[in-house]
Amino acid sequence: MIDLRSDTVTKPTAAMRRAMAEAEVGDDVYGEDPTVNRLEERAAEITGKEAALLVPSGTMGNTIAIKCLTRHGQEVICESRGHLLNYELSMTAWFSGCLIRSVDTPDGILTWDRIQPVIRPAGPHAADTGCIELENTHNMAGGTVYPPEVLREVCARAHALGLRVHLDGARIFNAAEACGASVRDLCEPADTVMFCLSKALGAPVGSMLAGPRDVIAQGRLYRKRLGGGMRQAGVLAAAGLVALEETPPKLAEDHANAKMLAEGLANMRGVRVEPAVPATNIVIFDVGATGLAAAELSARLRGRGVLINPIGPTTLRAVTHYDVSRADCRRALEEIAAALPGR
């Protein structure tokens, strides 16, 4: 099967498996797992933050960050298609007691001119704004990337108002590759950042939350409350350390494969790719004009050995990663063309 459902489906590399088998471990709840400690130190170094915390998932990392940066009863500003709002089981409300104030954008990028009108001060009627959340890359906008100057402006203006900023950087390494900046440069303006080890980087499990030392110390307690005290987690952290060093140089190839997929899809009758040229490794395409529902096309493709998920009535999302080759992408295009009406 050619699996383009997500970059979460990657299998750990041989180097990751060796590192896991040989990992030195201890009890991480006691802070005694040396491999976890090394991973957290490395993540803090890469993001330019004082400290970092290994969490089982990106959702837990985002949940902890929002809890640390807000008070119960505040609002969190988020783009309307953001992961925080749509794919995390309302944890902002359930755990942090905050309402998300969503903002529509054409490309998933929250600029200050869109944020400023929805900022609410403390008062007797409306809940005040607690923090701003940005997503880089933006998943459901097609892997779009924040220009570094936009990130800096939003964070600087937010901080001038006493507001803090959380960066959902699940695929921040893809963003860095796409815009030619370092991960550190993209993370520096924000107060906290979460990035996934288990998406584009290919580790089997885990995400990192990085930020000020006191915030991460508080976050460690929230992780325990959420059931994230994983004891001898060094067997997982070992794969994460390999992923941090081994995978980033491969991301350019994933981006090139996504562009090739987008070009091939755009040449098919009735198929529209948005954005037309993907910035990173996510290709979103609409097949509404073919008369075929996205779910039906997905089912047909499964029967032809290609896995692509529908994300709406007429839209699908294909995600490239290191377990999908250029030849796999070419074959996927052939199977999509054959599965569409009129063939």
Image: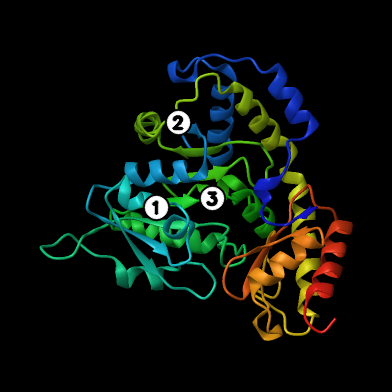
Disc marking residue 330: none
Mark linked to residue 169: 3
Q: Quadrant of the C terminus?
A: bottom right
Compared across the picture, whether 61 is left or right of 123 comes to: right
Q: Rounded to the nearest whole Å, what is the CA distance between mark 1 and mark 2?
A: 24 Å
Secondary element at image label 3: loop
Residue at point 29%, 65% (across, down): 119
- Residue type highlighted by circle 1: Val
Q: Residue 195, how many percent across, how many down?
A: 55, 44
Mark 3 or mark 2, whichever is nearer to me: 2
**Quick one: SS at disc 1?**
strand
Q: Residue at position x 49%, y 33% from top?
A: 52
Residue depicted at 39% across the width and 28% down the height: 224
For mark 1, what is the residue?
Answer: 165
| Secondary element at tag 2 | loop
Residue 198 placement: quadrant: top right
- The percent position of residue 82, horizontal first and vertical second, equals 47, 61
Whether residue 139 is situated above or below residue 271 in the rendered picture: above
Q: Residues within 10 Å of mark 2 (few under 14, many from 20)?
A: some
- Evaluate if marks 1 and 3 touch, with contact meaning CB atoms under 8 Å apart: no
**Cβ–Cβ below 8 Å for labels 1 and 2?**
no
Which residue is pictured at 13% across the width and 62% down the height? Answer: 123
Residue 80 at x, y percent in the picture = 43, 67
Spot occupied by residue 228 in the image (x, y as percentages of width and height) = 45, 31
How many other residues sit within 10 Å of disc 1, few (<14), some (14-19) or many (≥20)?
Answer: many
- CA gap, disc 3 to disc 2? 20 Å
Q: In this view, does 216 lie to the left or right of 54?
A: left
Q: Which amino acid does label 3 sit on?
A: Gly
Which one is in front, 178 or 225? 225
Residue wearing tag 2: 228
